[in-house]
Amino acid sequence: MGIPAPDTPQALTGPAEPVPVAVLARTSGRILQDPFASLSRQIRTCQAWLPAGWYIAGYYWDIESGSLDLEDRSQGHAYRAYADAGIPRDGGLADLLTEAKAPLPRFAAVVCEDIERSARDTFNALKLEKELSRQGIPLFATDEPASIEGINATTVLVRRVKQGVAEWYRLQLKEKAWKGLEEHALAGWNSGPAAYGYLAERIPHPVPAKAAEGKTKSRLIPDPARAPIVAQIFHWRVVDKLSIATIVARLNADPAAYPPPAKGGWTKPSVNALLANPKYTGYMVYGRTRTTNGRKGRRAPQDQWIWSPEPVHPALTDRDTWHAAQSVGIERGNVRDPEMPTSQPGRRYILRSRIRCRICQRRMCGIWRPTANGTSYIYYRCPHDPANPRHHAAHPDHGPVSLREDALLEALSQFFDQYVFGPDRAALLATQLPATATAHAEQQARQQAHLTTELARIDAAERGLITELEAPADPADPATVAYRARIRARYAELYAERTRTETALAALHAATPAGTDPALLDQLPTIARALADAPDKTKAALIAAFNINALYNREDHQVTIRASLTQDTPRTIAALLTDPRTDDDTWHGTPPASTTPAPATVSHLGQGTPVAQNLRGGQILRAFGARVPGGRGGAGRGLVEGRCRPRARGGEVPAAGSRRGGAGAGSRRGGAGAGSRRGGAGCGADRTAEGRAGAGAPNSPYSGMLPWHGFRPTGELEVRPSASTPCSTRGRRGSPGSA
C-alpha cells in the first residue's frame, strides 16, 4: 500500500503502522560466483536490516549483469533454476518498476544489500532512483539509515561516491579481463572450441595452483581427417570463384569425404564462418567480435583484431589466400555457378549479375519484353528509380537504361573471338599492358582516398555525438532519455558504417599489386565463334570460366567487357572442349601452340549456323535506351569485328556501323567506311569500288562493325598467373583502326 509522506521529516525508530518493503537483489552468472548463495545472503541481510514494524512484501531479483540498461533488465531466464530451488521471487527489476507505478503498489519502500546491487552503471542507478521517487517510493541500502522520508544529504554524498566506485570497478575489471585475454591470444593459446580442421591439444595450466585443480590451456593442431577439407574449401572459393551455395552442395554431396562440422550437414553459415576465420593462417586472432551498446557478437574492424606476432600453430592456408577469400563475394556478385542451375520455375538470364550501369554502377536486372508480333526479347534494365528520392539525389540526370541480350551476346562473341580465342590475342594484350597497370593504380588510389574521406566524416560525426552524450542531462526527463537513446542508436549506425569502411580499406591495402603473365593466353586454343555457336548451357559455362563482367555506357552506346584468366582457366576450357556430354557436331579449332593434341569433338562450338541478324538500327538503338532520330544512325561507331548477311547484292560484307550514316568509318551508305554498301573505298562494297569522300578505315579484322549493334564494345582481359598473386591486363578497342 502507498504511504503519504508527512510534512515534517522524522527519523523512524518504529513506524506507526506496518511498512511493506520490497527486496531488490541481483547477482551475476554462476561462472563468477554461486547465485544461490549470493541471493540467499542478500535476502537475509535485508531482513536483518528492517526496522521494527517493517516487513517484506515482495522479492524481486535477477541473475544478470549490473551494466545493462534498465530497459534491457529482466530479459533472461537464468532465474528459473534458483526459483525452483526455493528462493522466493515475485519478479525481476522490470516487474518491480511496473508494480511501483500501480495505483496501490504492494510496497512503500525498496531495499537492497548494497547500492551497487541496483545497477553498476551510474546513469541507470540514478534513473532507477528517479523512477521510484516519482511514485513516492524511496530506495534504501542496508548500510544506510532507514527513514521513510528518504535519505539525507550526507547519505546522498556517500551513495554517489559508492556508485561511482562501483562503475569504476566494473570498467577496471573489464579492462583487466580484456588485457588478460589479449595476452592469452598473443601467447598462442586458443580461446573457445577448436575451429573445424583443428584439434585442441590440452596442456596443463602454466599456473601451478590452477594446474593442481586440473585446469588446462589449449593449442591448435591439424586434424588429419579434416584439415585437407579446409584447404579444398579455400581453393574452391579463391581459385575457382565458386559461390557459397555451390561449395555447400559439393560438400553435402559426399558426407563421407567431407564430414560436416555438426549434425544436419554443411550449411551456408558454416562455410561462411570457416572462410572468415583467420586462425587458418596459423596466427592466433582474438577480438573479432565485440559487445556494442549491449549487443553481443558485433563484428569489429580488422584493424582492431589482436593477431599473434607470428604463426603459433600449423597453417591450413596462407594469409594472402585468406584475404582473397574475404573479397570474392564482392567480386563475383550474385552470379549463379553453372553446376548449380536454379530449381525455381521461371525465366533464365544467362548474363545475370554480370552487367552494370556505368552511371550508377548498379547491376542491371533481366526482364522480358514482348513485341507487337508476339515475339519476346530479353533486356537488361538498370534498377535506378527516378521516383526514389535517394536514387534521384545521387544521379539526377539518370534516365532509363536498358540493353538487349542478343546484341550483348554478339558483342561478347566478338570479344571472345578476338581477345580470348583469336590468333592475334597476344599482340592485342601486349599493347594494353602499360595502360592497364596505370589505370589500376589510379583506381586504387581513388578508392583509398574515398574511403579515407569517409572515415574522417564518420570520426567527426562520432565525436559530435559523444560531445552531446557527455553534456549533463537529467535522467528523469523523458525527452532527455529519448534524445540520448536516439544518439546512441545513431552512434551504433555510424559504428557499423565505420566497420564496413575500415574492412574495405583494409582489403584494399592488403590487395596484392597486379602482375602479368601473358603466356597464359598461349595455353588457350584458337577457336572461331566459340560463344556464338554454343548452346545456352555452354555459353553459361564459358562466361563463368572467364568470370565475364560488363559495364554499359548509355551515352556512348559502349559496353566494356572484362574477363579474368587464372592458371586453372586453361584446364577448365580444355575439360569443356573434351567433355563427352555434348552433341555430335565437331569443332575445327586450332590447338594451343604449346601442345599438339588432335582437335576435340565438341558440337556446341561448331561453326555451321550463322547467328548474325538483320535488324534496323533504330530498333536496336531504342532497345539500348539511346535516342535515335528518325531511325537513321549517324556516322558509324567502331564496334567489334563481325560478319552479317545483308539483304543486298555483293554477298557478305565485313561490318558496317550505322544503317545510313554520314561520312565516317563503317557507314553503310555514304562516307568513306570500311565495308560500306554504297560509296567509300571500303572492301566489300556492292555498287562502286571508288569512294566519294576519301579513304576509309582499314579493313582489318579489328575494324569491322556489326550493322545492327549501335554501341561500341571495348575489351578488358585480366590475366592472373596464380590465385595468390592476381594481376590484370586490358585489351581495349575503340573506333575502327584504333586497336
Image: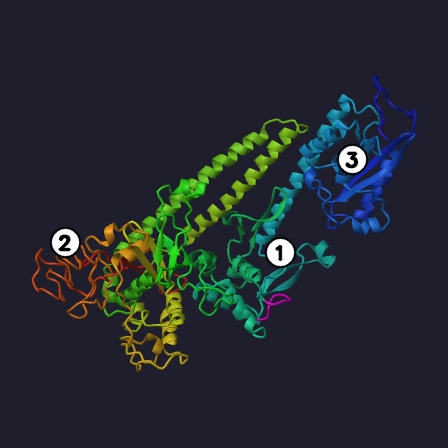
Say which residue label 1 marks. 191
Mark 3 or 1 closer to N-term?
Answer: 3
Q: x%, y% of residue 65?
A: 71, 43
Give the residues in magenta: 258-265
Cα–Cα span, label 3 and label 2: 93 Å
Taking the view exactly as shown, the residue that stands out farthest to the top is 8
Q: Nearer the viewer, residue 303 or 422?
A: 422
Q: Amino acid at mark 1?
A: Ser
Mark 3 or 2 closer to N-term?
Answer: 3
* In the image, residue 736 above or below residue 448: below
Q: Amino acid at mark 3?
A: Asp
* In the image, residue 109 above or below residue 342: above
**Mark 3 neighbour class, 10 Å CA radius: few under 14, some 14 to 19, many 20 or more:** many
Q: Is residue 516 visible?
A: no
Say which residue label 2 marks. 663
Q: Residue at x 56, y 41 (%)?
A: 492
Q: Is residue 164 visible?
A: yes
Q: x%, y% of residue 561?
A: 32, 59
**Mark 1 neighbour class, 10 Å CA radius: few under 14, some 14 to 19, many 20 or more:** some
Cα–Cα span, label 2 and label 1: 74 Å
**Disc marking residue 114:** 3
